[in-house]
């Protein structure tokens, strides 16, 4: 699978006024370092609460996914192997060789993970970009979509009232920016 | 007035629960194998999941229709026999079949379960439909998306079974169950393996100018400009260069979705018993939005008032919608 270039953000995509976005690429290594304990905790919790999702991933449990929130100064590296889970933030110039890459605005990606947006629809609209192994992407999408409840809310709840407040703010911002279809 | 049953897609157990909660009268689904025509990676049900799904649907007053709508290769029927046996044991409300051999087997072995004729059988004439009804006891036919409403009304008068029509989703116009385009390029069969444009053979390539090419089995089937809406990577909806055309053009079909929301009253009047929403490969979000919208519309029709129709264009392929042949044969 080829990925001939590093695509630029779509002109339609605007930076959310998040602190992370304002930090810029130079601060990315530090941000990634600070985020790591948080990401490790999140992925561990998700895996323990939703072990069924690994079944739908099949052989792509060992695929390296790069999930690239275009409006943040770093990408996420996910390897959903239940025996050795990896979720880490990586500066863009240190991304691993990806089996599959998924790019979009951060809030859109959050909505997709939470099954609040339809992956095909945002692919049709070109708000989501997929490169690399398409089957890996389809399997990840279907695995996440079969999960009950809200991953975002579960994650927010891990951090108590402040976590829930941040999530509520992010969702409001998504609705304001994109005319989102939150149910 | 016919019942106007709402038949909804489910690619996963969570999608099935979403469909039931959103008001589906029936949900159709399939096993994780070649017995159904949406045999996509990470999709579909294990027998254990189907057992729980049937229980959930029945508690919610919805039926479960099991798609066994592919064609077994000669001499390799065990998978289909096993799927039918499992479905009957788990209490599905109907089998959706396309192949005559599968229909015959189910009719003989599981006579207590209804048989629906899949669109994959491409039965579009009264003679063909009557044959399936008389030979195998088919109780409902899913009509191909190539007929006008007057044609549907005429067929209804000549057949002894219910009619189900697609009302939203993929606008497939090939002679369904006979399409070999995927097989030609990838070696896998839509009709026997259940895979149209298998994801393992699909590749999206972005160029420096922001354009995107979609490829299947190494064959470029479309190229989208940076801001152009995209469609599914299927050969039938590809855009091709040809000597008699100055630019690439859609040689077979276009990336556009069917949406008959505004024609529901006419379909009911024509004698359509059930409205089918396409999209087992789509997300819970799609299922929730589309099923809810059509639930409200069908309830309005049943109550004798003009339906309140939600705008669903954001969920359509290519973000374009059509009433296709249902409105006129000159739809394109």
Image (spheres, rainbow, N blue to C red):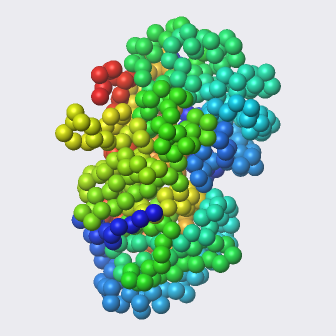
Q: Is residue A130 visible?
A: yes
Q: Is residue B235 left or right of residue B143?
A: left
Residue A66, position as x, y percentages in the image: 47, 72
Furthest residue toward front: B243
Residue B300, position as x, y percentages in the image: 44, 30
Residue drawn at (44%, 29%), measured in percent from left and top?
A: B174
Q: Is residue B17 visible?
A: no
User: Against A170, is A27 above or below?
Assistant: below
Q: Quadrant of the C terminus of chain A?
A: bottom left
User: Against A14, is B33 above or below?
Assistant: above
Residue B41, position as x, y percentages in the image: 59, 53
Furthest residue toward left: B246
Question: A18 and A37: which one is in front?
Answer: A37
Task: Kindly indicate the quadrant of the structure image that contains residue A59.
Answer: bottom right
Task: Kindly indicate the quadrant of the structure image that contains residue B109.
Answer: top right
Residue A25, position as x, y percentages in the image: 33, 85
Q: What count of labels does the image hold?
A: 0
Question: B234 and B4: which one is in front?
Answer: B234
Q: Quadrant of the N terminus of chain A?
A: bottom left
Residue drawn at (38%, 52%), measured in percent from left and top?
A: B214
Q: Is residue B228 left or right of residue B133?
A: left
Residue drawn at (41%, 37%), measured in percent from left and top?
A: B236
Residue drawn at (68%, 66%), measured in percent from left and top?
A: A51
């Amino acid at each position: 699978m080829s990925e001939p270039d590093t695509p630029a953000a779509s002109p339609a995509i605007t930076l959310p006024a998040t602190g992370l976005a304002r930090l810029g690429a130079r601060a990315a290594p530090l941000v990634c370092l600070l985020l790591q304990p948080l990401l490790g905790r999140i992925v561990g919790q998700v895996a323990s609460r939703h072990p069924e999702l690994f079944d739908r991933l099949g052989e792509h449990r060992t695929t390296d996914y790069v999930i690239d929130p275009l409006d943040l100064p770093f990408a996420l590296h996910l390897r959903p192997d239940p025996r050795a889970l990896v979720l880490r933030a990586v500066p863009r110039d240190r991304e691993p060789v990806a089996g599959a890459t998924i790019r979009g605005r951060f809030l859109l990606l959050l909505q997709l993970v939470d099954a609040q947006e339809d992956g095909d629809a945002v692919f049709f609209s070109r708000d989501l970009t997929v490169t690399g192994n398409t089957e890996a992407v389809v399997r990840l999408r279907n695995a996440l979509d079969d999960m009950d409840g809200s991953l975002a809310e579960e994650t927010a709840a891990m951090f108590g009232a402040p976590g829930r407040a941040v999530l509520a703010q992010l969702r409001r911002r998504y609705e304001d920016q994109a005319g989102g279809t939150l149910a | 007035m016919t019942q106007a049953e709402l038949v909804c897609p489910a690619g996963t157990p969570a999608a099935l629960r979403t469909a039931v909660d959103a008001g589906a009268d029936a949900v159709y689904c399939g096993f994780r194998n070649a017995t159904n025509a949406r045999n996509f990676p990470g999709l579909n049900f294990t027998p254990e999941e189907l057992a729980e799904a049937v229980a959930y649907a029945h508690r919610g007053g919805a039926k479960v229709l099991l798609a066994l709508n592919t064609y077994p290769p000669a001499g390799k029927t065990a998978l289909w026999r096993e799927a039918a046996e499992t479905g009957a044991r788990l209490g599905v409300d109907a089998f959706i079949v396309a192949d005559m051999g599968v229909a015959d087997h189910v009719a003989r072995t599981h006579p207590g379960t209804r048989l629906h004729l899949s669109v994959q059988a491409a039965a579009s004439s009264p003679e063909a439909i009557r044959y399936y009804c008389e030979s195998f006891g088919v109780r409902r036919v899913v009509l191909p998306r190539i007929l006008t409403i007057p044609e549907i009304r005429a067929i209804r008068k000549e057949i002894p079974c219910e009619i189900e029509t697609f009302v939203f989703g993929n606008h497939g116009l090939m002679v369904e169950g006979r399409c070999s385009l995927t097989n030609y390029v990838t070696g896998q069969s839509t009709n026997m393996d259940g895979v149209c444009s298998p994801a393992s053979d699909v590749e999206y390539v972005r160029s420096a100018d922001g354009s995107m090419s979609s490829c299947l089995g190494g064959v470029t089937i479309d190229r989208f400009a940076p801001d152009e809406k995209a469609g599914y990577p299927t050969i039938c909806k590809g855009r091709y260069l040809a000597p008699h055309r100055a630019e690439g053009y859609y040689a077979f079909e276009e990336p556009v979705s069917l949406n008959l929301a505004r024609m529901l009253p006419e379909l009911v009047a024509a004698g359509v018993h059930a409205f089918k929403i396409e999209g087992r490969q789509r997300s819970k979000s799609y299922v929730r939005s589309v099923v809810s919208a059509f639930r409200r519309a069908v309830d309005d029709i049943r109550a004798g008032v003009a339906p309140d129709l939600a705008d669903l264009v954001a969920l359509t392929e290519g973000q374009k919608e059509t009433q296709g042949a249902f409105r006129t044969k000159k739809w394109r």
